[in-house]
Image (cartoon, rainbow, N blue to C red):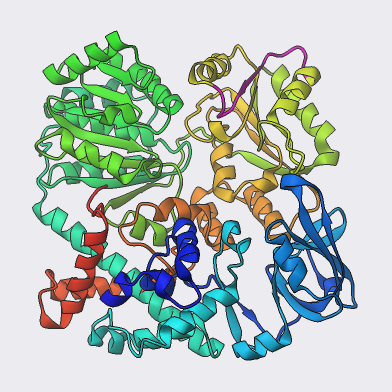
Amino acid sequence: MNRLRNTDIKFLRGIGPKRAELLKKHLGIATYYDLLHHYPSSYVDRSTIHRIASFTGDMPQVQVKGRFFSMTVQGEGAKTRLVGLFTDGSGQMEVVWFNRIKYVRDAIVQGQEYILFGKPSLFNSRWSMVHPEIETEATIQADGSRDGFRGIYPIPEQLRTRGFTARSFSLSVREMLSHIPQLDETLPPWVIRRMNLLDLRSAIGAVHNTPDMATLDRARFRLKFEELFYLQLDILRYSRRRKDTTPGFIFSRIGYYFNTFYSQFLPFPLTEAQKRVVREVRTDVGSGRQMNRLIQGDVGSGKTIVALLCMLMALDNGTQACLMAPTEILATQHYESLRALVAPMGVNIKLLTGSTPVKARREIHDGLLDGSLHILVGTHAVIEDKVAFKNLGLAVIDEQHRFGVAQRARLWRKNIVAPHVLVMTATPIPRTLAMTVYGDLDVSVIDELPPGRKPVKTMLRYEEDRFATLSGVGRQLRQGRQVYIVYPLVKENEKLELKSLEEGYENIRETFRDYKVAYVHGQMKPAEKDYQMQLFASGEAHILVATTVIEVGVNVPNATTMIIENAERFGLSQLHQLRGRVGRGGEQSFCILMSKRKIASTTRRRLELMTETTDGFVIAEADMHMRGPGDIEGTMQSGLAFDLHIANLTTDSQILNLARDLASETLDADPTLSAPDNAILRAELSRQHNRLVDWSRIS
C-alpha cells in the first residue's frame, strides 16, 4: 500500500500531468491509492436501455440508444453551446454541450447509432441531457461490460466537461490493478475470518469492475466494514483512555446558587426527563473525571434550563462557566434569558460577541481574570486566545455541529484542569449517527415537553389554498398574535420558480397594511439584522418575513403561526427546526407548509410526515432513511477523525453496529492493541493519525 500512496497519478497510462492536475484540484486524487479509493456511488446495468418516451422527472442517470439527426452551434461568446437532436424511435431529446464543442461536433457522425448515458431533465417541455457519456456498441464490447454493471463515479461538472467519464475512471483503475498482483492487507487475518470478508485485492477490484451483483455486495460489505471498524476502534480507544486518564473538577457541593435558583426562581417545574439529565450530570461532575456529555432535546424541551442548573453547580464549586453559541442572535437570546433568571441572585453574567465594544471587552477580560465574572455567554469570540478565565469549570456548547472541532478544542486550553463539557443540540440525531459522530460523549435525551406546551398543528397547503391561508393569518393577527413567513430565496431567480423574500415582503405589506412587517435574511449586515429581529421580538412588528436565518435561536412566545413557502425545497430536519420557532407559548400554534402540487412522491411523503408528527426523533430517523447521503452526512461526517470513502452513516447502520461490537470486543481483550495479532490494527491507526490531526478526543 505504501507504494500506491507514494506513486503520483500522472504516471498512470492515460492520465498524464494535465489530467492529473485536474484530478487533484477537483477530487483530491493525487496518487494511485487515492484513485483506488474513489469508489463508484452507484451502478448501472449495461443491459438496460431506457426509452425516451418512458422518461420521468425523477429518473437517475440512464442509458438510451439512438441516433443524432441534427447538430447545431447556438449562442455567442460565453453562452455558446452545441445542441444535438437525438431520437430513439420512441421520442426525441436535446443533447447539450457547453465545452469541448469542436471536439464533440467533429467526433459525432449523424445517423450512426450511439448509446448515451446521463440524467434526463425536462426543460421547456422537452427532454434534454447535458454532457452525457457517449459510446458505441464497439466501445462497450471492447470494454467487456455489455452484460455486467458499470460503476457511476462522483464526477464534478468541471471534470465531466473535460472528458472525464465513468468509463474512463473504470478503465484507469483496471489499468492500475493489472500491474498490481496483490495488495497488502489492512485487516488482520482473524478479522477477515471472523467476518467472512473478501481479501482486499478482490474487494477493490470488484467494486470498480464488478462481475455480478453478488460479488459486488460482498466487496462493498468488506470495504464498508473496514472503514466503520477503524472509525469505531479509534473513537472507543480514545473514549476509554480519556475516561481513565483525564481528570476533571470534582463538583462536590450543591450550594447557594443551585438551591436558591431551584427553590425560588425556577420558571416552571422540571419534567422528569430534565430531572434525569441533571442527575446524570451530577454523577459525572462528582466522579473526578472530565465530563463530556451530549444533551439531545427537541425544540422547546428545556435544554437551556438544564444547562443553567449545571452552570450553577460550577459556581457553587468556585469555578466559572461559559456558554458558546454559533450565531450572535442565538448568543444574545441565551444571554438575555439567562440574565433575567439569575441576575436577582447576584450572578454576574456578560455577553461577548464580535459586536462587543472595546471598553466592554476590557471589563469582561478583567472580570474573567479576577473571577468576579461568573458566566460568559458568547459566540466563537469566547475562544479567542486573549479571552482567559481565572478558573473555567464548565463549558456549554450549543448546536455543537456548527462549530469546527479545532474551535471547540481551544476551550480545553482555557484551564490547567480541563473544564467539564456539556454539548447541546436541538437537532435530534439518530442513534447510529450519535454513536459515531458523538461516540466519545455520553448521551442524555430530554424527550418531554414542559407542561402547558401544545403540539403545533401542521398543515400542507397548495397555491389554490393561499387565500384561505392568509385569511387564517389575519385572524391570528387580530387576536394579537405574531406570524413568521419563511422564503427559500432572498431575490427572485429566473432559473428557479421559487418564491423570494423581496417579492414576498412587498406582497405581505400590501395584504396586511394595518400591521408592521419586519424582514431578516443572511445577506444583511449584523446591525440591521439585529434591529429587524428586535422589532419582531419586542412585538412592535407583527409579521417577520425571513429566510432560514431564523432556523435556530429565535424565541418569541407570542408568535403562533409559521408559513413556509416552497416547503418542498426544505429537508425534514430543517422544516422541523423552522416549525420549532412557534408553539413556544401557551396558545395553539400552526405551521403551514406551502408547496407546489406537482412534486415527486418522496417529497410529498416528506411533507405529509411533517403533518403527522411533531416528534423530532421520529423525524430524524425518517430523514436519515428517506434522504440517505446528504446534509445530515455532510454535517456529521465533517467532524470525523477518519475519512469515509464508501461507508454511509445514514444507510449502513447494520454494518456500523457490527463494526462497533467487534471494536468493543477487540479493546476489551487488548486495550492497547499490543498483541501480535493486532499489529495491523495498530499500524493502520497510526498511519491515519500521521495523516490527520487527532480530534477524536475532543467533544
The answer to whether residue 671 is above or below residue 126 is below
Q: Is residue 515 magenta?
A: yes
| Quadrant assignment, res 230 | bottom left
Front residue (pair 252, 130) = 130
Is 76 positioned to the left or the right of 232 in the image? right
Q: Is residue 664 visible?
A: yes
- Residue 52, position in %: x, y? 83, 72
- Residue 572, position in %: x, y? 58, 50
Front residue (pair 303, 93) = 93
- Residue 149, position in %: x, y? 60, 84
Front residue (pair 685, 309) = 685
Please name the predominant secondary structure of the magenta segment in the image: loop
Is 610 positioned to the left or the right of 17 in the image? right
| Residue plotted at (28% across, 83% down) | 185
Question: Image quadrant for the N terminus?
Answer: bottom left
Count of numbered badges drawn on the protein: 0
| Quadrant assignment, res 353 | top left
Q: Is residue 1 visible?
A: no
Is 439 positioned to the left or the right of 91 in the image? left
| Quadrant assignment, res 64 | bottom right
- Extent of the magenta region: 512-524
- Residue 498, position in %: x, y? 74, 40
The answer to whether residue 118 is above or below residue 616 is below
Front residue (pair 350, 120) = 120
